[in-house]
Structures are given as C-alpha cells and as structure tokens.
Image (cartoon, helix red, strand yellow):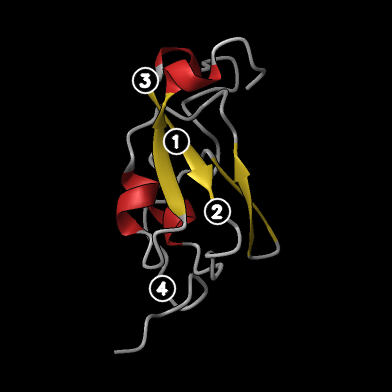
Amino acid sequence: MSLKSWKEIPIGGVIDKPGTAREYKTGTWRVMRPILHKEKCIDCMFCWLYCPDQAVVQEGGIMKGFDYEYCKGCGLCANVCPKQAIEMRPETEFLGEEG
C-alpha cells in the first residue's frame, strides 16, 4: 500500500490559522507534549493535516516542529504518524522550559 503525500490529498476543511484569532493561545493547559524524532519523519505531513489547531510547523512541505503556544496536546499528530516519529511526553517533564 502506498501512502499519499499531503499534496495529493483533496482539499478539505483545514484551518490555516490556529483558533479563531492569534490571541487565543491554547497551549497553556496542555498535559502532554508532542516531541518530533526528525530521524524517523518522512515529511508525509499527516500530522499537519490532522492537527485541529494547525500547531504543526511546516515549511515547504518539510516538518519543522510544533507551535507549543497553540498545541493542546491532543495526540492526533502522534496517532496518525505512519513512522511513529512523534512521541507524546508528559508536560511535567518540561517545567521551567520555554515553549
């Protein structure tokens, strides 16, 4: 079975701005944080496509990371990743860190 790239998936209901306005930062109540293991990532962009808050940062079809100000930690990105390149870690591991 061959997976389609993000460019081949028909246009749908993607919201290209997190939330209804940039001032609504929703990452402050996250309990799990997605961590990208870039060495496993194949840049299929399924994480970008499925993220309900567009918190996946991509540039030219290349996965760059996450916008933690908007990421709610729902784990959809990790669940749809065909290479298990995204790991969900408890937010408590990152106390005192930026982002």
Which of the image's four quarters has the C terminus? top right
Choose mark 3 or mark 2, whichever is in front.
2
Which residue is pictured at 52% across the width and 16% down the height? 24
| Helix, strand or loop status at disc 2 | loop
Residue farthest toward the bottom in the current orientation of the protein: 1
Nearer to the camera, 23 or 68? 68
Which of the image's four quarters has the N terminus? bottom left
Label placed on residue 53: 1
Amino acid on which the number 4 mark rests in the picture: Ile
Mark nearer the N terminus (4 vs 2): 4
Which residue is pictured at 46% across the width and 78% down the height? 8
Residue marked by disc 2: 37
Amino acid on which the number 1 mark rests in the picture: Asp
Which residue is pictured at 36% across the width and 20% down the height? 31
Which residue is pictured at 42% across the width and 45% down the height? 87
Q: Residues within 10 Å of mark 2 (few under 14, many from 20)?
A: few
Mark nearer the N terminus (4 vs 3): 4
Residue farthest toward the front in the current orientation of the protein: 93
Residue 36 seen in this snapshot: yes
Residue marked by disc 4: 9
Residue marked by disc 3: 31
CA–CA distance between discs 1 and 3? 16 Å
Q: Is residue 37 above or below residue 83?
A: above
